[in-house]
Image: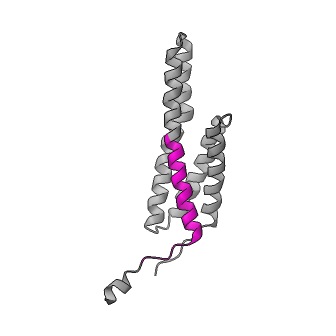
Amino acid sequence: MSGAADQEAPQRGPIEAQLRVGLLIVQVLAGLMVLLAVATVVVAFQDDGADDRGRALQVAFAFILLPAVVLFFTARSARARLYTQARSAKLYSVLAGVFTLVAAIPLLGGLTGVLLLVVGLFVLTAAVLYRWKDPA
């Protein structure tokens, strides 16, 4: 029985819980950005203009798809590091917040951009307030 007492789960604070929820929402919004990129390309290919197709591919790839992939994997890595209580969890969480704010800039004209901006500020604030505790 004393072995179970030695392997207690580390105490997780409310800031860490908020940060984990914020990073999960960032991952969901990154998935929505991928859907937005696909929709942009599909709509452009239904039109007749060849110039519009090329421009839509450029916009979808450079401003929507690439930032979405970076956001998804940075938030995923930050959540994994938070779960294992790694020292670099704060760094990756701050990076996820900053990348979310940067990804929101070209999309601010729509609902997705506003959501990204709000969630990015939330994650960035929670990441700055997060304090790593030495497990020893």
Q: Residue furthest right?
A: 109
Please report the bounds of the magenta region as a residue range: 9-31
Q: Specify the quadrant of the image occupied by residue 93.
A: bottom right
Q: Specify the quadrant of the image occupied by residue 29.
A: top right
Q: Position of residue 30 (x, y in %)?
A: 52, 43
Vertical order, 8 against 16 (above or below): below
Q: Position of residue 43 (x, y in %)?
A: 53, 21
Q: Nearer the viewer, residue 46 or 84?
A: 46
Image point (48%, 59%), residue name: 79
Image point (50%, 52%), residue name: 75
* Tally of marks: 0
Q: What is the quadrant of the N terminus in the image?
A: bottom left
Is residue 63 one of those drawn in magenta?
no
Image point (56%, 13%), residue name: 51
Query: Is residue 129 found left or right of 60 in the rendered image?
Result: right
Q: How is the image coloured?
A: one colour
Q: Main secondary structure of the magenta part?
A: helix
Vertical order, 82 against 44 (above or below): below
Q: Answer yes or no: is residue 61 visible.
A: no
Q: Answer yes or no: is residue 18 visible.
A: yes
Query: Is residue 104 found left or right of 23 in the rendered image?
Result: right
Is residue 25 one of those drawn in magenta?
yes
Q: Position of residue 61 (x, y in %)?
A: 51, 30
Vertical order, 122 against 104 (above or below): below
